[in-house]
Image (cartoon, rainbow, N blue to C red):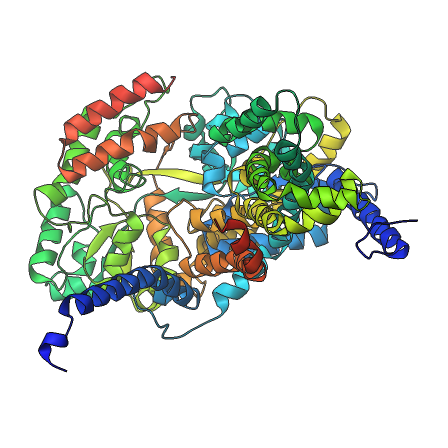
């Protein structure tokens, strides 16, 4: 091959592309590796000079982190699952109605629901605290599940409405021709076709219930069912907000991050279909 | 029955319906609270067990403190007919409004532990029960050895009607000098004669020699982090120099002290160590006292004036250096006011009965709470205080035993605290606005002074002025 055949620009472009890709990969990977590494280090190591491979790896942070979190992980699971199920129960029929039905005030109602998403929800904390206290929902798992609907329901309706709108009306009509009622056509035809959207919304609702800190912290006293994230906050805060047990913090972060990651991997196909434009 | 053209049989349809009905029932039951762990806090169980809601902060001080508190709670529950309902809170829960919001919304514990300077927000509205109302129910022997601490701690509540609102468990007396003996030797200094510094001029002289002739880059590290610049070494100097004039608030809490001569002079001296004498590293404006202690361990600096809590940090990161005497503690100098600085407490207190709660039921919980207080005031628990909370135990009769403790006897930490507390009388105020006074307003301004962006005098004036505008006295 002569020098003339050598596409210098092309090679440079390709090298640059790979360089940028590798840089971005490392940008994500190195902190993750560091988190993993620190979670296996004893305190004397993570307070010393930074290094990636632990000299004397230990499971101490993982065992103490898990022992501290185990009850709270169950609470988080109940809250996340409850939030997802309730959100789906409320929003599937709601979104279907907004997508397929004509009724008075439909547009206004839809935008009113969307508008609720635009305000910072910390505004709601004080009124919800008061109301939940009066209703006996404060410091309870059902209370948190209900509170999350305030911001989960609008985005769920938004996503599902768009999803239902993209489904051809003909299929539903065909099912009715074959003897389905409107409801059974919805249950037997529309819901299975909308499965990717429903799974996606359920996953996002679960993530909200699982990961939220604000409501989880402010709608609990700490003596009742505390989700996992406020416990992580306690590990970050330490005594006076200055002494952080980095090993345990990293282990707890990974422990809390694992269930949603597994859930994502299980539901990956559905999620990708749901978000494919 | 025709079920449509999708191949479903009647049997499967019925099963599915049954399943949906069962699932709906379970979900409804769950939402109604069956899965919830809804807490009817502070109830007295039907089996005669007393349920005691306890908001707990001590555990967050260290891993050792956490273990101590968890095992003590477990032990207490097995010894008594009490079910403790713990909230395992953090500093941010108390300081960030979570506790206050909860109490305002009717969720109040019978008992809490905390740091006294954070608790004015609970004392001012009358939620905390003064100690005088239950002192006679405390263990007599413990009270006898706590009287000195009760007396001293009253300075923290001097703006309120009652003398004492919280029982001190440990006293955090600030701020000890911490030094590297090997650096002193290399610099031709004697740790016996030249440490701890006897006054500011002596500090400058020793630190200069350490820097010039010792192995470290810097002789003495100051710290300007917003959470530390006003609450460790600097306030130790001002308190020892000015007494109440050197505390954040004046004696009757009618004004802030930052713009008086004591604060201006001491702040200038503090900043000068870095800006004029060059005895601290460039990290000074952002360094925390823990960061400074880490620099000491690494040998980048030879001496710091840190927190008693640094003992816990040194134990976890440099236990060998503590044990072989490479790192030693020393009390701060005695100033013109006749003391070696200020203090605050790790404390425990009872809350008043809220409206609408049965008197007898509350009384029963309060009895359990008193039993718990007596447990943390017991000799056994108090001996654990220096190891776990890194503070001086409030109960004086356990001090001699601490010197025989394997771990504590390896360093001069306890004897340093004993010397420091002698003659001390000025505690951090439990004023409801202390967070703004100590940290939120003053912290950034004093940090600017350490950076050299404004003068020490300007930092003091502006802090005082802004506090007067924003905090009610």
Question: Is B29 in front, or is B7?
Answer: B7
Q: Position of residue B277 (x, y in %)?
A: 8, 45
- Tell me if B90 is positioned left or right of B48 in this view: left
- In the displayed structure, B49 sits above or below B121; it is below
Q: Nearer the viewer, residue B312 or B92?
A: B92
Quick one: B105 or A73, which is closer to the camera? A73
Q: Quadrant of residue B46?
A: top right
Please state the horizontal and vertical placement of residue B238, each as a whole percent of the image. Answer: 24, 33
Total labels drawn: 0
Q: Is residue B117 above or below residue B62?
A: above
User: With respect to residue B430, does B447 lie above or below?
Assistant: below
Residues A66 and B414: in front is A66
* Residue most extreme to the right: B1
Quarter of image, res B265: top left
Q: Is residue B447 left or right of residue A48?
A: left
Residue ID at (25%, 52%): B292
Q: Locate residue B109, reporting x and y percent.
A: 62, 34
Instruction: Judge left or right: residue B166 versus residue B294.
Output: right
Residue A126 image-quadrant placement: top right
Q: Position of residue A208 (x, y in %)?
A: 55, 44
B253 shown above or below B445? above
Image quarter (top left, top right, bottom left or bottom right) of the N terminus of chain A: bottom left
Whether residue B21 appears in this view of the structure is yes
Say if residue B255 shows up in the picture: no
The single residue placed furthest to the bottom in the displayed view is: A1
């Amino acid at each position: 091959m002569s020098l003339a055949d050598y596409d210098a620009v092309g090679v440079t472009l390709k090298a640059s592309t790979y360089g940028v890709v590798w840089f971005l990969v490392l940008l994500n990977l190195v902190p993750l590796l560091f988190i993993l590494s620190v979670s296996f280090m004893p305190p004397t190591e993570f307070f010393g000079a930074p290094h990636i491979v632990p000299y004397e790896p230990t499971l101490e942070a993982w065992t103490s982190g898990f022992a501290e979190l185990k009850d709270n992980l169950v609470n988080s699971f109940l809250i996340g699952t409850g939030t997802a199920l309730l959100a789906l129960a409320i929003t599937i029929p709601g979104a279907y109605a907004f997508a397929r039905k004509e009724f008075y005030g439909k547009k206004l109602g839809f935008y009113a629901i969307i508008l609720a998403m635009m305000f910072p929800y910390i505004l709601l904390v004080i009124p919800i605290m008061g109301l939940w206290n009066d209703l006996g929902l404060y410091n309870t798992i059902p209370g948190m599940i209900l509170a999350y609907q305030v911001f989960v329901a609008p985005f769920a309706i938004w996503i599902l409405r768009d999803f239902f709108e993209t489904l051809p009306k003909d299929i539903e009509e065909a099912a009715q021709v074959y003897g389905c009622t409107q409801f059974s056509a919805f249950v037997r035809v529309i819901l299975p076709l909308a499965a990717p959207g429903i799974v996606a919304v359920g996953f996002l609702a679960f993530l909200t219930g699982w990961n939220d800190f604000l409501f989880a912290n402010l709608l609990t006293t700490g003596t009742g069912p505390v989700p996992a994230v406020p416990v992580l906050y306690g590990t970050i805060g330490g005594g006076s907000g200055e002494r952080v047990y980095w090993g345990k913090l990293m282990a707890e972060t990974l422990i809390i991050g694992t269930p949603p990651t597994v859930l994502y991997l299980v539901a990956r196909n559905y999620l990708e279909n749901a978000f494919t434009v | 029955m025709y079920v449509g053209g999708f191949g479903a049989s009647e049997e499967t349809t019925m099963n599915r319906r049954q399943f949906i009905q069962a699932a709906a029932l379970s979900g409804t039951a769950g939402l109604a609270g069956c899965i919830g762990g809804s807490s009817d806090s502070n109830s007295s169980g039907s089996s005669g067990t007393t349920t005691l809601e306890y908001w707990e902060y001590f555990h967050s001080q260290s891993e050792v403190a956490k273990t101590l508190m968890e095992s003590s709670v477990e032990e207490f529950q097995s010894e008594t007919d009490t079910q403790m309902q713990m909230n395992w809170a953090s500093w941010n829960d108390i300081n960030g409004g979570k506790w206050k919001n909860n109490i305002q919304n009717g969720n109040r514990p019978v008992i809490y532990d905390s740091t006294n300077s954070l608790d004015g927000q609970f004392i001012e509205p009358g939620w905390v029960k003064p100690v005088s109302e239950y002192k006679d129910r405390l263990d007599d022997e413990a009270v006898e050895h706590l009287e000195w601490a009760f007396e001293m701690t009253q300075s923290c509540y001097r703006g309120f009607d009652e003398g004492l609102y919280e029982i001190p468990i440990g006293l955090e007396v600030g701020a000890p000098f911490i030094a590297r003996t090997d650096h002193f030797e290399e610099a031709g200094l004697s740790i016996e004669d030249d440490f701890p510094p006897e006054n500011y001029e002596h500090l400058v002289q020793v630190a200069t020699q350490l820097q010039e002739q010792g192995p470290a880059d810097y002789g003495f590290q100051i710290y300007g982090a917003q959470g530390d610049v006003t609450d460790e070494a600097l306030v130790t100097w001002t308190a020892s120099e000015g007494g109440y004039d050197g505390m954040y608030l004046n004696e009757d809490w009618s004004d802030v002290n930052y713009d008086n001569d004591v604060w201006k002079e001491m702040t200038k001296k503090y900043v000068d160590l870095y800006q004029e004498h060059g005895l601290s590293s460039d990290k000074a404006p952002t360094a925390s006292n823990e960061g400074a202690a880490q620099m000491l361990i690494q040998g980048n600096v030879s001496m710091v004036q840190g927190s008693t809590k640094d003992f816990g940090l040194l134990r976890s990161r440099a236990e060998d250096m503590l044990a072989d005497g490479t790192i030693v503690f020393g009390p701060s100098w005695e100033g013109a006011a006749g003391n070696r600085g200020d203090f605050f407490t790790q404390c425990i207190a009872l809350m008043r009965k809220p409206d609408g709660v049965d008197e007898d039921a509350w009384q029963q919980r309060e009895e359990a709470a008193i039993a718990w207080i007596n447990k943390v005031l017991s000799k056994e628990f108090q001996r654990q205080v220096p190891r776990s909370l890194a503070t001086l135990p409030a109960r004086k009769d356990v001090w001699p035993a601490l010197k025989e403790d394997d771990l504590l006897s390896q360093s001069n930490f306890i004897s340093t605290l004993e010397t420091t507390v002698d003659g001390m009388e000025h505690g951090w105020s439990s004023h409801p606005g202390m967070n703004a006074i100590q940290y939120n307003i003053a912290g950034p301004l004093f940090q600017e002074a350490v950076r050299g962006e404004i003068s020490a005098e300007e930092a003091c004036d502006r802090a005082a002025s802004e506090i007067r505008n924003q905090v009610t006295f």
